[in-house]
Image (cartoon, grey):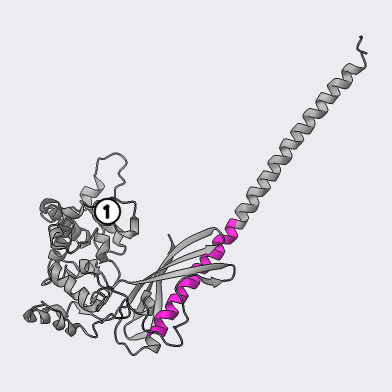
Amino acid sequence: MKISPNTQPRGIALVIVMIVILVLAIIAGGFAYSMKVETKLARNTSFESDLEWLGRSGVEFARYILVQHLNVTTEPWDSLNQKWAGGPMGTNEVLETISLENNELGEGTFSIKITDLERKFNINMVNERTIPLLQQALALLGVSPGDSSVITDSFLDWIDPDDDPHLSGTESREYTSNPNPGFTPYVAKNGPIDDLAELLMIRGVTPEIFWGSSEANRNQPTLLASASPFAGLGVGGPSGLADVFTGLSVGTINLNTAPAQVLQLVPGLDPLLAQAIVTTRAGWDGTDGTEDDVPFRSPGEIINVPGLPRPIVQQLVGNFSTRSFTFEVLVDARINQYTRQFVAVLRRNPGNPRDVQTLYFHWK
């Protein structure tokens, strides 16, 4: 059978048409995908803004709870069984219906967790005279005496205003002349700690020593429990420096919220006495934050702690209070499958406890 010469151009034209259609389909598909991505990015941008406002709302909600806690209670103390800390007590008709979890606002929800910072030592209270406190913390972490000397002397060099290093310390000249590849030179702070993470910049402080197994960073390595010289006493030591220190607090330690890991750093308290304080305030069930808690109403009430020598009570009282004034707020915001966590620090005015200010707010 002969093929007519006229059919050949028709076949070529058909192929060209099919190629054009295929190209147009690819272009249309690419355009549709691009529009889908753009739409999703626009939606995400909108969600980011909404999530931020949810976070800010959570912080304001925390401020409200802290203010109402003082307005509606006659309890002259802050403790773990109260509403702000997630406990069941310290409520009336104003706070009894309030939940810290899954609060609906618009299209999203938020949950908050309030933690007082007076449960930890303020690292800025450590100086030449009180340096044994940091040494004790490092000993509990199982840090060797040689490494501990490097860390404590370098810490003092970090906060003091001069450039003269202590015996085992480190000043700016060492931080600026480090020859290791990839190291970015920096100078010593020569001032107080603003953010506790500054400790990681101090010679000798490793992520393991700083974080341990703290919830603040679950991915960081953990010190072995057996490394602590007090491991055999049945009283847990801190996992890392982040567990026992803060850069923000009024300086005194709240007897009703501080864990044994912090209390045992106070001169005059060994791990067993520190645990006895926690057991006393926890009530019959031995668990903090429950209805049968027996909070200390004043620092002097530690005289009632079994096994605590009366002669040292007076020297201990000055380290403690039963009030907290600095609070960290974690806000978990959610809109559909989108989530964001925010953190803020609130400061309660000691002169006017109903005045609760936001020191800072950012997302994690």
Query: Relative to 187, is 134 above or below?
Result: below
In the image, residue 260 lies at what x, y percent?
21, 69
The amino acid type of the residue labelled 1 equals Met
Q: Is residue 19 left or right of residue 218?
A: right
In the image, residue 40 lies at what x, y percent?
62, 53
Which quadrant: the C terminus?
A: bottom left
In the image, residue 88 lies at what x, y percent?
37, 79
Query: Can you tell which quarter of the image residue 11 is in?
Result: top right
Query: Relative to 17, is 194 above or below?
Result: below
Query: Can you tell which quarter of the image residue 197 is in?
Result: bottom left
> What residue is drawn where x is 17% and y is 62%?
137
**Residue numbers of the magenta segment:** 44-69
> What residue is drawn where x is 12% and y is 57%?
229
Query: Relative to 10, is 288 above or below?
Result: below
Q: Is residue 55 magenta?
A: yes
In the image, residue 276 lies at what x, y percent?
17, 74
In the foreground, 90 or 126 = 90
| Residue located beneath label 1 in the image | 201
**Magenta segment main secondary structure:** helix
Label 1 element class: helix
In the foreground, 143 or 224 = 224
